[in-house]
Each structure stands twice: as structure tokens, then as C-alpha cells.
Image: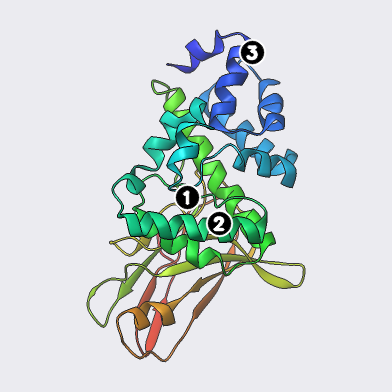
Amino acid sequence: MTLQNFNKKDQATAKSALLQCCGAAKWADKLLQYFPFNSEEELVSRATSIWYEDCNSEDWKEAFSQHPKIGDVESLTKKFAATSHLAEQEQAGVNQASKDTIAALAKANKEYESKNGFIFIICATGKTAAEMLRLLEDRLKNDTAEELQIAKGEQHKITLIRLQKLLSDADWNSLKVSQLTTHVLDTSMGKPAQNLTIQLQAYQSEKWQTMAQGVTNKDGRIADLLPPNRILSPNNYRMVFDTGAYFEAQQIKAFYPMVEIQFTIFDDQHYHVPLLLNPFGYSTYRGS
């Protein structure tokens, strides 16, 4: 469907479609104030600003509640029938997981929900079950305020993916990649550092708080730390690399348990923060 075809829908049909992309009623209602949309770029811009500026924690949690738990097949097929076709595609990596991994996901998700009051939200597209389990276990270490910020960003990634699926024949060239990316190279082995946890943090309320989190892929990269078109306010930020756990998993003693890189965002340009790493040293630079 093109955007032009979508614009011909009646308000009720359009709202129903938008709610399948993001289950927060306020988000859908406010977005419909701009319906019909002039362009795909306007749709994304409005969807983003409403989500981050007009919605609050209750709206974000409402959207979270419309998702099946990662690996929860029963809720996927029963409670969430309206979006099951979307979630099944997004959670394809879970379908290929072992029973032990599924059981571990279910156990960790139960612990996560008990701790935070909402289910674990992750943009699962392209991730294996093992990667999702690793992220879930890592994020269990965060406090609830941090997790709400992380989950808010993950939900918006999902929303944009679903909008693209809804309008599969639309022009999405205006969608930009994550404003912030990273690449970690293990110089001691001459290859990318896979399965290294990275947190993006902002200084808020007189302390550093995590606002996004990911794990490096087989190429040592995290390309989607932020949702597309999400622009950070000019300020100081830092990325925390869990280098200790990375080397410990390889049974290698390392001198630095964590690497923390502070940097400044000046504008809406793309920022790339790479890390060259070995057990006893590291370096970084402003990449492109």
C-alpha cells in the first residue's frame, strides 16, 4: 500500500492500522490529527515527536502491553491475534531457538516483569534468540527508570518497522540510520569483537543514566542503537563498553573491566564512535 492509498482510508480504519504499529491510544489519536499525511517524512516526523514529546510513561507502558513476551507462543497466538503476523516475523529468531533457550527467555522475562512492572521490549528483527537472551540478562541489571527509557526507544524502532510493512509501497528514503553507531575491533585477534554489551548514557538528575543498550553483532557493530530519525539533543553523552565480560567469556585476563568514552553531540549529523580494543589497551576516534 502506498501513502496515497492509506490517506484514502476512513479515520476508524486508519486508527486501527496505526494501533497495530503502536498500541498507545494517545499516540494514534494525536497522529491522526495530521491525517491525511503530506509525505512519508511528515508521518515519521510526527510519529516520532508525539512518541517522545507528547506521550508519557503510561502511554509507553500501554504500547508495551500489546506485545507478546519474547518466546511466549501462547500469548502470541491468543491474546495478540491482531498483530501476531507482525510479531511472528519480528521474533523469527526465537522460532529457531532450542527449548533450553526458550525456557531461559521465559524465566528471565518473568523476572524482568516482576522487577519493572512491564514486559521486556526489544526490537527483535534480525536478532537470534541467543542475542535476545543476552540482552535481556544484561538489561536486568538496569534500574526501572533506565529500562523505561530503553524500552521506549525499542518500541519506536518496532513502530517504524511496522509502518514500513503497513505502507510497503511507500517511499521510505527519508528514513535515516541511527544517528549514533559504533564498531569494536579486537586488535589482539585482528577481528571484530562480537557479543560485547554497550550502553549509551546521558547525564540526568546528577548521574549517568542508560538510555539505549545493545550487543555487537558478528561484525562488531551496533547499527541500530537509536531508532531511525531519532536526533539527540546537543549535549555530552558517553558509551560504556563491557570489556571485562567480553574478555572473561574468552577466558582472557584483561586490565580494563569497562571502557567509558565521553563525547559531545553538536548537531543532527551522524556520529560514529569506534573502539580499537585489546586486553591491555584501547583507543577511539570520531569516525564516519
Q: Which element is circle 2 on?
A: helix
Asked which quadrant contains residue 246, the reply is bottom left
Residue 87: x and y in percent read: 44, 36
Q: Note whether 90 is above or below 103 in the view shown.
A: above
Residue designated by label 3? 12
Measure how far apart labels 1 and 2 are at the Cα level.
30 Å
Residue 174: x and y in percent read: 47, 33
Badge 1 amino acid: Ser
Question: Is residue 80 toward the left or the right of residue 10 in the image?
Answer: left
Tell me which label, 1 or 2, sits earlier in the chain: 2
Measure how far apart labels 1 and 3 are at the Cα level.
32 Å
Badge 2 amino acid: Lys
- Is residue 26 visible to the viewer in this orientation of the structure? yes
Question: Residue shown at 45%/66% (left/top)?
Answer: 273
**In the image shown, does 32 or 87 lie closer to the viewer?**
87
Residue designated by label 2? 110
